[in-house]
């Protein structure tokens, strides 16, 4: 009996120390401070719709996962704490579904800043000039739409691994070199092998940046954009392009369809109400247990308090982002 009481006393004292840890580490400089979610800390939620019109059904899941990873990498580069990037599939009429990307940015209440943070990363595409278009005059080509004179190859920014600035050894002009991953390298080799002599255009955000002619099969997965990167302005443009590509070229276009901003004051109010409600709930339960069960009720109340303290400590150590769902 004495041994059990001693163990119980030790556990109560340990719970007290844990409680002190929870309380003392709740300051702005502590690395164990609670990580508050969007609804408690305030922030911005951005919802994007993905344009999958050019993606075959079997590649939809892979494209959306790559899109999420790219945006997540971009957000992390700006150091936004506890940002959440997730995918949603919204059912529409019939069997149609709409793929969405939801970005939650706690602490960012400036919508314009949030949108700028996500950025308009380049849509990188490689398209073949059609055989019919190669026979057309310049005037005829100008009357045609891009979709009428270029053929999709399936090679897009989702296969991009890395890009860097290189310089032409003859002219000294800046160029942007791109390295594809293994899957992209294989696809690029296949495209160049089967289309020797044809023009392969490189598109960024729908604009043609380069139109080299395929002379031979290209293995190794390297491609070069030799646009008009002349002079200091051109070099600056090339650097910006490399930066954006390395942050992540989007595999599919996205369009912002809704924004929601939760002010910091609203988040603080929700947090205070949650704490207030939790304390009163704990007090009421303890009063009931003690009034009904006497000493066992007191012990149960102490155990309940210790359980709450341990959970809060785990939220700090893991850490867990806490949400209040209204």
Image (cartoon, rainbow, N blue to C red):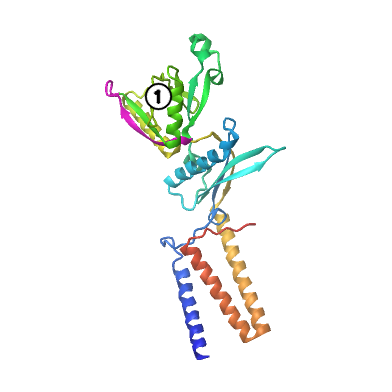
Instruction: Give 35 or 178, whichever is nearer the viewer.
Output: 178
Instruction: Give 53 or 183, whichever is nearer the viewer.
Output: 183
Classify 10 Å Cα crowding around label 1: few (below 14), some (14-19), many (20 and above). Answer: some
Q: Magenta segment, which residues?
A: 158-172
Instruction: Give the quadrant of residue 298.
Output: bottom right
Q: Determine whether 130 is above or below 178 in the image.
A: above
Instruction: Give the quadrant of residue 288.
Output: bottom right
* 213 with respect to 309 (left or right): left
Task: State whether residue 249 appears in this view.
Answer: no
Q: How many marks?
A: 1
Q: Position of residue 312 (x, y in %)?
A: 52, 67
* 279 with respect to 193 (left or right): right
Q: Determine whether 116 is above or below 324 in the image.
A: above
Residue 258: within the magenta?
no
Residue drawn where x is 62% and y is 84% of the image: 296
Q: Position of residue 35 (x, y in %)?
A: 49, 58
Residue drawn where x is 64% and y is 79% of the image: 287
Residue 162: within the magenta?
yes
Q: Determine whether 303 is above or below 30 in the image.
A: below
Where disc 1 sits, the SS reads loop
Task: State whether residue 290 appears in this view.
Answer: yes
Residue drawn where x is 62% and y is 57% of the image: 325
* 126 with respect to 93 (left or right): left
Q: Which residue is mark 1?
A: 217
């Amino acid at each position: 009996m004495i041994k059990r009481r001693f163990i119980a006393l030790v556990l109560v004292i340990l719970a007290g120390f844990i409680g002190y840890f929870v309380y003392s580490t709740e300051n702005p400089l502590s690395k164990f401070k609670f990580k508050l979610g969007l609804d408690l800390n305030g922030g911005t939620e951005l919802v994007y719709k993905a344009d999958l019109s050019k993606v075959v059904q079997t590649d939809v899941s892979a494209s959306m996962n790559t899109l999420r990873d790219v945006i997540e990498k971009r957000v992390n580069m700006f150091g936004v704490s506890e940002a959440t990037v997730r995918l949603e599939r919204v059912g529409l009429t019939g069997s149609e579904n709409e793929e969405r990307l939801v970005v939650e940015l706690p602490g960012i209440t400036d919508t314009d800043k949030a949108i700028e943070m996500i950025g308009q990363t380049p849509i990188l595409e490689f398209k073949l000039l059609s055989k019919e278009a190669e026979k057309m005059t310049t005037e005829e080509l100008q009357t045609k739409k891009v979709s009428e004179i270029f053929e999709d190859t399936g090679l897009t920014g989702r296969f991009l691994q890395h890009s860097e600035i290189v310089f032409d050894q003859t002219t000294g002009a800046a160029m942007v070199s791109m390295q594809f991953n293994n899957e992209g390298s294989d696809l690029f080799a296949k495209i160049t092998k089967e289309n020797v002599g044809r023009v392969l255009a490189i598109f960024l955000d729908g604009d043609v940046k380069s139109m080299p002619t395929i002379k031979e099969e290209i293995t190794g997965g390297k491609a070069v954009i030799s646009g008009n990167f002349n002079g200091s302005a051109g070099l600056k443009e090339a650097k910006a392009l490399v930066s954006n590509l390395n942050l992540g070229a989007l595999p599919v276009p996205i369009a912002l369809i809704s924004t929601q901003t939760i002010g910091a004051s609203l988040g603080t109010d929700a947090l205070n109400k949650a704490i207030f409600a939790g304390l009163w709930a704990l007090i009421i339960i303890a009063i009931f247990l003690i009034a009904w069960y006497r000493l066992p009720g007191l012990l149960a109340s102490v155990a309940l308090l210790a359980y709450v303290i341990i959970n809060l400590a785990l939220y700090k150590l893991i850490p867990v982002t806490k949400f209040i769902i209204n």
